Image (spheres, rainbow, N blue to C red):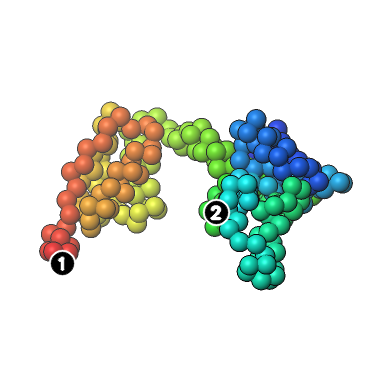
Amino acid sequence: MQARDIMTTKIVSIDDCANVRHAIRLMIENEISGLPVLDRLGRVCGMLTEGDLLSRCEIGSLQQSCADIGKGDDALLNYIRSKAWRVGDVMTPNIIAVTPDTPLPTIAKLLASHSIKRVLVLDEGRLVGLVSRRDLLRAIADMTPDAIAPGDDALKLAVTTRLRTELGLGTERINVAVHNARVRLTGSIDSELQRQAIRVLVERIGSTYGYIDEMHVAPGLLERRQ
């Protein structure tokens, strides 16, 4: 799936010359935590989020004046961001954006690595949507298990194949038996954590109607761990 498949296209944005109070009202009324900021030509020039407004002097976040701490760039920037009423002075100018064909794993990594809640979707520089953490959660909830051919033989093949390709466990370690879509596993494993990973693998296959675990931790490995 790509950004275009899950992005929100009904976007509430704001002009960079707008008043911060207006921006706050828009966030509250639309129950959103951020607004794309557009310049006079309609191009994205920044993002205004709840986090950008936490340093406002109205709530006492700025404890010192520039005269108290010197007129360095950081002090002046903090002064401007805490007192300005123009959105362009308060917004974050460095935006994180993707294109409509950006894969979801890439978007998820961007959100995590930059500790942000959303990315804008730009098509040739034009704002066409945004993808938020909630959009990704909806995509996860809506995804269906991979389709598997009916029958015990097909289910056994699916489990055996995934054990080998995803966990590196071949038939010499784990024996898979399936009867009436109930999966029975026997053999030796390295740890209880590996047992948990195997259970997760089987449960992700939607065609199963039960799971019987008769695997045991290899004695030699258990002794070395103790």
Q: Earlier in the sequence, mark 1 or mark 2?
A: 2
Circle 2: element type: loop
Cα gap from disc 1 to disc 2, whole angstroms: 41 Å
Q: Which residue is mark 2?
A: 115
What residue occupies the far right of the structure in this picture? 41
Q: Residue at x 27, y 53 (%)?
A: 194
Residue sitting at x 55%, y 43%: 133
**Kind of residue at disc 2:** Ser
Q: Nearer the viewer, residue 40 or 210?
A: 40
Which residue corresponds to the image point at 23% horizontal and 43% vertical from the top-left? 185
Q: Nearer the viewer, residue 176 or 49?
A: 49
Give the crowd class for mark 1: few <14, some 14-19, many >=20 residues within 10 Å: few
Kind of residue at badge 1: Arg
Please name the residue that numbered disc 1 is placed on: 224
Residue 120: image location, x then y, percent: 68, 46
Q: Quadrant of the C terminus?
A: bottom left
